[in-house]
Amino acid sequence: MRRLFCLLICFLGLMLQHLFAAGPSAQKGWKAGVAKLTITPREPMWMAGYSARTKPAEGKEHELWAKALVLEDIKGKQVVMVATDVLGFTKDLASAVKQVLRTRYGLSDLDILLNSSHTHSGPVLSDALVDGYSFSETEHAKVDRYTQWLAGRIIQVVADAFKDLKEAHLYSGIGVTRFQVNRRNNSAAELHRLSELRGPSDHAVPIIKVVNKRGRIVALLFGYSCHPTTLDGYEWSGDFPGYAQLEIEKSYKGAVALFFQGAGGDQNPLPRHTTALAKQYGKELAAAVESVVADNQMNVLQPVLRTAYREIDLPFSPPPSVDDLQGVIRNDGNKSYYSRWAHCLIAQIQQGKPLKTSYSYPVQVWRLGEQLVVSLAGEVVVDYAVGIKNKYGWDTFVFGYNNDVMGYIPSARIIGEGGYEGDTSQRAYGLPAKWDPAIESLIYDACDQLVRSLE
C-alpha cells in the first residue's frame, strides 16, 4: 500500500510538472524570436537619398539587411519590430506588409513597428521621393520589382523570427555617443574651428538587450538620432548604422544587432563623405552599446506589453498658386526636382484634381515593461525627441522613420525659420505644400492621449 501511495505521489508530481512545463509562456515570462535576411538588390539599380546621383549602384561595401524581433509577454500578447537598411517605408509598402502580418499572426497596427535606418546608400523604392529622382522607365521597372521582392523578404524575416520564439529576459539601458551635429546651425566646413556646437541634439543611444534562458545575448536593439549620410558613392551600404551592427555582431557571437533610427531629421554625422568615417562612427556607436551592456546595470523589463496607435490628420499650409509654381520653374531653370515638383502640381491643378490639404500620420506608443517607446513617422527633427523626453522622462526611447516616411516632420520653430527641413524638403517627396505649424502640437496631443491610454 505504501509503495502504491508513493507511486501515486510521484505520478501526480510528474503530471503537475508536465502541466507547468506545457502551459503558456505566461508561466515563464518573456518569449523572444529574432531573425535576419539580406535585402541587397540582386541587380544594379538606382540608389536612394541623393538626387545628384547620375547612375545605378556599382557594387557594395557590405550587405543590406532586414531584421525582425518578435516579443511575447506573460499573457501571450505579441509585437513585431522590424529594422531595415532602406531610406524609408512608404505607406503602400508598410500597408502591404502589415496586411499579411495581420492575417497570418492576428496582429494589429498597434503591434507592428516598421523602422528604416534611412541609409542614403540603399535602393530607391516605389512611390518614394517621387520627384527626387530622374531616371528611365527601365530603371522604374527595376525599382518596382525590387519593392515587391523587399515586401516578401520582410514578411519572411518576420516568419523566421516567429519560428525562433524562445524563453528570454529583456533589459533596457541608454548609452551616449556624440558624432551627430545639428546641420542647421553648424557648418561642416568650419567644424574643426568651432569651440562649441550650436543647436539642439540628442546624443542618447537607447538599447534593448535580449538574453536567452542560458544567459547568452541573442539580440541587441539600439538606436541613434542621426542621418546616415556619411557616404554618397555608388556602393550599397548601411552607412554608419550598418558598420555599427557589424561591430556588435562581431563582439557578441551569434547575436543579431538591430538598428532603429531616431529623431535625426536635422542631424548629420560630421565630418563625412568617406568610408573611413562611416566605419569610425559605426565603431563609436557600437562602443556606446557595448559599454552599457558590459556595465551590467541595465533595467530589467517585466514581461508586460502595452501598445497604442492612432493616425491623425496633419494639415498643410495653403498650397502655392500656378503663378507661384511657374516662378519655381523659372528660378530653377528645369534643372532639379524643384521643377519636376512644380510641373506635377501644375498638371494636377489644370486637370481639376484637388491638392491634398492634410496627411494621415501614424503615431505609435509602447510600453515594454516600464520602458516607454514613442515611435513617430517621417523624418522627425530632433526637437521632437527633446520635447517628448521633457514630457515623459529622459529615459524614454524616441524613434523616427517608422511605418511611413512621407517627408520631413519639422517643429513649429523650424517651420518658422524655413530652410530645407522647414520649407523646401517637401518638394522631393511630392507634397503639395509645407506643413502648417500646428502639426507639432497635434503630434504632442496624440502622444499624450496614447501614453495615457497605456496607464
Image (tube, grey):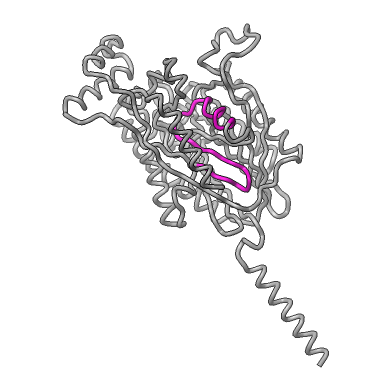
Instruction: Tell which of 256 and 269 is nearer to you.
Output: 269
Over which residues does the magenta segment extend? 365-390
Q: Quadrant of residue 176?
A: top right
Can residue 242 be seen from the camera position used here? Answer: no
User: Residue at the location (57% across, 19% down)?
Assistant: 181
From the image, which quarter does the N terminus lie in? Answer: bottom right
Is residue 368 part of the magenta span, yes or no?
yes
User: Does residue 213 sit above or below 177 in this rendering?
Assistant: below
Q: In the depicted view, which residue is nearer to us: 389 or 85?
A: 389
**Horizontal placement of 406 versus 279: left or right?**
left
Above/below status of 318 relative to 248: above
The answer to which image quadrant residue 139 occupies is top left
**Along the line of sight, which residue is nearer the eye, 424 or 121?**
424
Pick out the residue farthest to the right: 2
The residue at the far bottom in this view is 1
Query: Can see residue 295?
Result: yes
Number of numbered discs visible in the structure rendering? 0
Residue at x 63%, y 69% (from the top left corner) = 22
* Residue 450 coordinates in the image, percent (x, y): 49, 43
Residue 436 counted in the magenta span: no
**Residue drawn at 48 percent across, 29 percent down:** 380
What is the quadrant of residue 297 in the picture? top right
Find residue 285 and report its horizontal and vertical position in percent.
64, 29
Q: Of all residues shown, which one is farthest toward the left?
A: 351
Residue 36 horizontal/vertical position (percent): 55, 45
Q: Residue 320: x percent and y percent? A: 27, 19
